[in-house]
Image: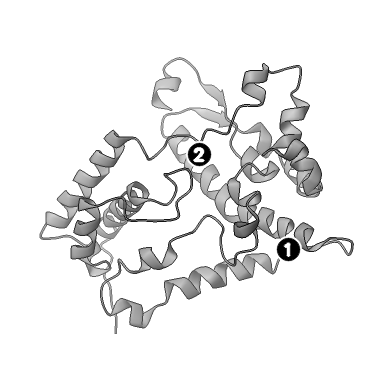
Amino acid sequence: CREIRKNFTVALSGECADEIFGGYPWYHNEEILFRPGFPWACSTEQRAALLREGLLGDINPADYVNSCCLETLSKTEYLDTDSRKDRRMREMFMLNFHWFMQCLLDRKDRMSMAHGLEVRVPFCDHRIARYAFNIPWEIKAAGGREKGIVRQAMAGILPDDVLWRKKSPYPKTHNPTYLAAVTARMRDILADKDCRITEIVDKSKLLALCDNPDIFEGNWYGQLMTSPQIFAYFIQMEAWLRRYDVKIDRQ
């Protein structure tokens, strides 16, 4: 965003097309499709295990995640004619609208406005989102492809090599330079005698993760919900704990 702002004040982004038109693999993988919980969260128990010993006796992250998921699913509306798969696809889109898409939009707004750049997201136009929510899945996945309806709509407009290419996710976390940077920052935080995050997470487990960042399983695209994102999350949490001088009271 900083580099774009040097030459432009407004940019267009394709964000939300995957959420609205079914671009992610969890829309297409039958095994994942009917699995309980958030489809993109494959290692909740592994992440919960990073908490300090004793905290898991007071809280249950897996139960909390599941309750959030069920609460969102309870808001899903169905048609009487919906098949089992139709109903599940509506639920999947509801989960993605309320959670995954909101996260991406928040990230986009923060990154762009921090540099005075206005980023517009035409796929997220409320009229498109409202209409597309009720498009039958067979049409959304036209041709058996992710975002099939969008690809076919652009036929004759975009070059074929662009139109039909395999989905290539934005490489936001698997760059080795980024991993090295967040790992080094995580080590610096843990080495600080005034470290706040260790009131919540187990220091030895985080250090072990720094030494072996590939232990998290079940990630998407080789990057989603893996160690770089976990480090970044804890780095942000440390900054929040310090800035607002948050105290952990377990009484």
Residue type at tag 2: Asp
- The picture places residue 1, in percent across and down from the top left corner, at 43, 28
Of residues 227 and 200, the one nearer the viewer is 227
The residue carrying mark 2 is 109
Neighbourhood count class around disc 2 (C-alpha, 10 Å): few under 14, some 14–19, many 20 upward = some
Farthest-out residue, right:
81
- How is the model colour-coded? one colour
Q: Residue at x 55, y 24 (%)?
A: 11
Q: Residue at x 73, y 63 (%)?
A: 76
Of residues 20 and 81, the one nearer the viewer is 81
Please identify the quarter of the rendering in which residue 19 is found. Answer: top right
Q: Residue at x 27, y 55 (%)?
A: 243
Residue type at tag 1: Thr
The residue carrying mark 1 is 76
Residue 43 vs 247, above or below: the answer is above
Please identify the quarter of the rendering in which residue 38 is found. Answer: bottom right
Query: Sequence-wise, which precedes: disc 1 or disc 2?
Result: 1
| Circle 2: element type | helix
Viewer-nearest of discs 1 and 2 = 1
Residue 25 vs 207, above or below: the answer is above
Of residues 209 and 60, the one nearer the viewer is 209
